[in-house]
Image (cartoon, rainbow, N blue to C red):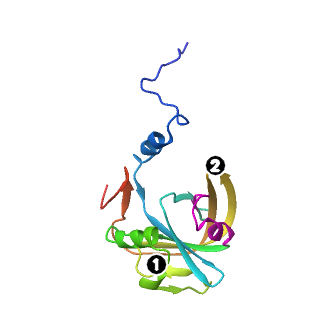
Amino acid sequence: MASAVFVQNARDPNADSADFRNALGCFATGVTIVTCRDGLVPKGIVANSFASVSLAPPLVLWSPAKASRRYAAFVAAQTFSIHILAQDQKHLADAFAHNETPFDTLNWHSDARGVPVLDKCLVRFDCHLHAQYDGGDHTILLGHVDHYQADEGAPLVFSQGAYQSSI
């Protein structure tokens, strides 16, 4: 017969959201920039919520925060591209995190779908929207990968509130 196990130092995630966020930050993630078009305006956002979902069909997900000033553009987008950054591309993450108009200073072009795509990232997944799900203070966007491009190299990693060049 199994007995209940008391977990020492167990914390309630609702009691201290900053502490819970720090705990989540112990999981190292890659760094992506997701791009779409909002009318005629190119939009981009840094996201580390990227994950693979399925090989058949080829599905990936990412989750924009509802509080983001770019949220509306991404949940309305029917097509988008997810760029996985290489370890020497922190400047791209900084540009999209801190600049309202990062496309003005970066090398990019529109693909055949009209989606803005960044030049020379480690990997790029070109997707169309497959499904959306409520995820609390985020929305989970499931993308069907139509095409991808991959280069060789090491990814930029984010863990414990800081960028890392490797894990």
Query: Residue drawn 65% across and 67% down?
Result: 72
**Does the image show residue 85?**
no
Is-magenta flag for residue 48? Answer: no
The C terminus: image quadrant: bottom left
Mark 2 burial class by Cα count in 10 Å: few <14, some 14-19, many 20+ = few
Give the residue type that dot 1 points to: Pro
Q: Secondary structure at mark 2?
A: loop
Give the residue type that dot 2 points to: Gly
- Direction from residue 88 to residue 19 in the image, left or right: right
Image quarter for residue 114?
bottom right
Residue 136's disc number? 2
Residue 93's disc number? none
Mark 1 burial class by Cα count in 10 Å: few <14, some 14-19, many 20+ = some
In this figure, which residue is indicated by the disc labeled 1?
A: 102
Query: Label 2 near label 1: C-beta < 8 Å?
Result: no
Q: Earlier in the sequence, mark 1 or mark 2?
A: 1
Of 23 and 80, the residue lying toward us:
23
Q: Position of residue 113 (x, y in %)?
A: 62, 83
Query: Looking at the image, how many numbered discs can be counted on the residues?
Result: 2
**Does the image show residue 69?**
yes
Please identify, in this view, whether the residue under mark 1 or under mark 2 is nearer the observer: 1
Instruction: Please give the range of residues in magenta.
Output: 61-77
Q: Position of residue 109 (x, y in %)?
A: 50, 87
